[in-house]
Image (cartoon, helix red, strand yellow):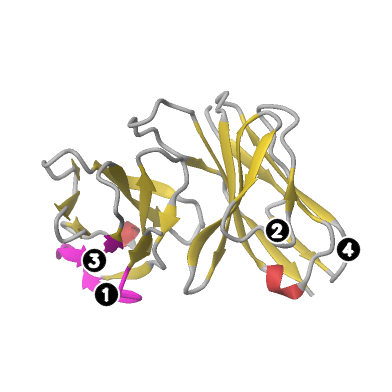
Amino acid sequence: AQTVTQSQPEMSVQEAETVTLSCTYDTSESNYYLFWYKQPPSRQMILVIRQEAYKQQNATENRFSVNFQKAAKSFSLKISDSQLGDTAMYFCAFRGGATNKLIFGTGTLLAVQP
Amino acid sequence: EAQVTQNPRYLITVTGKKLTVTCSQNMNHEYMSWYRQDPGLGLRQIYYSMNVEVTDKGDVPEGYKVSRKEKRNFPLILESPSPNQTSLYFCASKVQLGEGLMGEQFFGPGTRLTVL
């Protein structure tokens, strides 16, 4: 069975600094998708960034980028120029290539300090 | 505006009192799903539906029921709620693409349920 592990329950970063959130996963599939979701205090689930496993190039979305290491089954999220509005819970999620089900990690609570 | 709506957003109830949390999407999505979020556990899938009249269990289905009589609606039913069902619930929907295609899952705003 696939699993997603986020080993950092909480992290803190100063405004304008860069922070990296870790995520590892376990799967025997070769085709799959990986996602990072942001959950601010409003509780809304917001898709931040996504990566297709067959693409070697790391995905980027403005200040958010990923470091996708397929062999190591690692999918970390880098937030550059952190802003107060980045304060949120961040979830890493996995989806197999032939399924719609998302498997989530336990989340990392990120606090951006002024 | 494309969206997934859930009602109610907050609910406090007592053990054994049947309740329904509604979910509706306006994007004509085939796939719909319910998740529960608990501290330290992330989100876990309760039930999902691939299309009208097609539903199946997720990872934590005990104590829940669902139905999919219309494409846009996917209610979550708790026949006899218990305190261990106190949680944050999310409904999500997604277009059913061919295998190998990504597609984005859209989430509702969440329902905070407390069972006393």
CA neighbours of label 2 inside 10 A, class few (<14), some (14 to 19), many (20+): few
Q: Which residues are magenta?
A: A6-25
Question: Is A18 a magenta residue?
Answer: yes
Q: Position of residue B15 (x, y in %)?
A: 84, 71
Q: Amino acid at mark 1?
A: Ser
Label 3 sits on what residue type? Ser
- Label 1 and label 2: CA atoms lie apart by 30 Å
**Residue occupying the point 41% across, 59% down:** A1
Residue A49, compared with residue B84, is above or below; it is above
Can you give x and y, in whole percent of width and height, for residue A74 in the image? 20, 60
The reply to whether discs 1 and 3 touch (Cβ–Cβ < 8 Å) is no
The circle on residue B17 is: 4
> Residue tagged by mark 1?
A12
To which chain does the residue with label 3 belong?
A
Q: Nearer the viewer, residue A66 or A87?
A: A66
Which residue is identified by label 3?
A22
